[in-house]
Image (tube, rainbow, N blue to C red):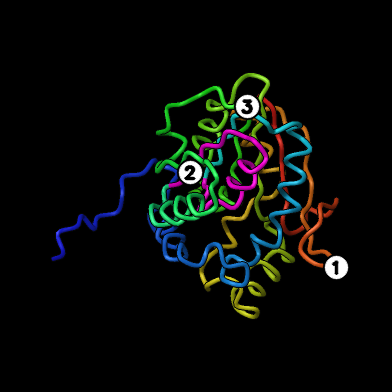
Amino acid sequence: MDGRDNRPPATGASADAAEVAKFDALAAEWWNPRGPMAPLHAMNPARMGWIAARLGPLEGLRVLDVGCGAGLASEWLARRGAAVTGLDAAGAALEAARAHAAAAGVAVDYREGTPETLGETGFDAVLALEVIEHVPPAERPGFLAALARAVRPGGQVILSTLNRTPRAWLTAKLGAEYLLRWLPPGTHEFRLFLRPAELGALMRGAGLVVEEVAGLSPSLREGFAVTRDVGVNYLMAGRR
């Protein structure tokens, strides 16, 4: 025994312990653009550009980034003047996030936990990017309700996720995990992907008005582009 408490951290219902462990294991490579998080690095400029266009001026905007991991989205927002709280149940990923932000001189308030246990409200915007597909289906209504509680009236809740289509299975599951080896096998479970209609129903059930849906597609040049094609990755924005 090394004297440390090696038990998994206490988490809210939406944080599945096995899913948290997957992302903790990737913490050291999170900021490597050619590592296992390469797809997130590739899509981040397009998805954050779309989000920023919806939110308007970021200076001073209070943003909660749920499932922030090691901080790709959180740092992007903070560098542009937003006051960002990054929330994640994966402790090792948060350690990597804090270390990277400190080295870069970027201020982000990183916290360990889930939105159900945060207890803070009044954010101008709440993001949950590539997160909902890792939340157990039975816990998704509570997860969306917690996101809605955290945002101020009139504020926006924005999610990105994977569609449950044959094309998404081919590209995001078979291709990314087993053929191209961009992600460790088992990172995603296809049965947990959500169709836009399903995510929209969850958002409306949480009292949010769905305002916009957009696709994220690989660009012919490089990275990703925002398109009308929601067949694989997509973004959805709702307003309280």
Element carrying mark 3: strand
Question: Of label 2 and label 3, which has the lower sequence position?
Answer: 3
Crowd class of label 2 (few under 14; some 14 to 19; many from 20; radius 10 Å): few
Front residue of 201 and 93? 93
Look at mark 2 in the image and give the residue it sits on. Answer: 138
Q: Amino acid at mark 3?
A: Asp
Q: Which residue is mark 1?
A: 221
Q: Is residue 86 above or below residue 70?
A: above
Q: Please report the bounds of the magenta region as a residue range.
A: 67-88
In the displayed structure image, the side of residue 70 where residue 208 appears, left or right: right
> Where is the C terminus found, in terms of image quarters?
top right
Percent position of residue 140, x then y: 52, 41
Mark 3 vs mark 1, CA separation in Å: 34 Å
**Spatial separation of the CA atoms under disc 2 and disc 1:** 40 Å
- Left or right: 101 in relation to 5: right
Q: Earlier in the sequence, mark 3 or mark 1?
A: 3
* Quarter of the figure with residue 178: bottom right
207 inside magenta stretch: no
In percent of width and height, residue 78 lies at 61, 41
Residue 49 versus residue 162 in the image, above or below: above
Name which residue type carries label 2.
Answer: Ala
Please identify, in this view, whether the residue under mark 2 or under mark 3 is nearer the observer: 3
